[in-house]
Amino acid sequence: MIGAPADESNLEVEFGTRPAFWASALKGPSGWPANARVEWVTAWPIATLLAEFGPTVICCGIEGGEYDVLVQPLPGVRLLIVKFHAAAYGDKGVDRISEALMAQGFEPDPKGSRGSTVVFSRSLKGVGKT
């Protein structure tokens, strides 16, 4: 899984591609949509990607995958724009992700947030970039 611990690199997961590429996703609680073509793809732990590329901003809508990915440490990231998919993990899942982000020093920013898309930011000045 993308958010798996760093020692689990080179994993493969099933991924359902769809004609509208932005609707492609991991298998949801209701299974695969009728128009999904299921393929095996390589999944990299978020820690590996952060270490290799060092992004300071992440913008994502992972069609439910944010439940596993965004509870991981996000060192060096100062801004996160995320589209929550509560249909995949419920309101408790949204709360779990939000609490994990706030525990890392992120705060919701209402200026950029709309509906299920939420902006989180944090200052990395004087902090160990965690």
Image (spheres, rainbow, N blue to C red):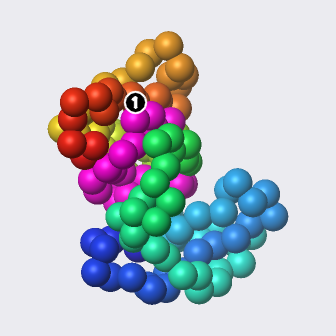
Q: Is residue 72 magenta?
A: yes
Under circle 1, the secondary element is: strand
Kind of residue sitting beneath label 1:
Phe
Position of 123 relative to 9 (above/below):
above
Which of the pair 16/97 is nearer the observer?
97
Main SS class of the magenta portion in the image: loop
Q: Is residue 21 left or right of residue 122?
A: right
Q: Which residue is depicted at the point 50% across and 36% down?
A: 81
Position of 46 relative to 13 (above/below):
above
Which of the pair 57/53 is nearer the observer?
53
- Of the 4 image quadrants, the one containing the N terminus is bottom left
Position of 114 relative to 92 (above/below):
above
Q: Which residue is depicted at the point 46% across and 42% down?
A: 56
Q: Is residue 48 magenta?
A: no
- One can see residue 21 in this view: yes
Residue where numbered disc 1 is placed = 120
| Furthest residue in direction top, as rendered | 111
Percent x, y of residue 18: 74, 66
| Furthest residue in direction front, as rendered | 126
- One can see residue 95 in this view: no
Highlighted range, magenta: 62-82
Q: Is residue 8 left or right of residue 39?
A: left
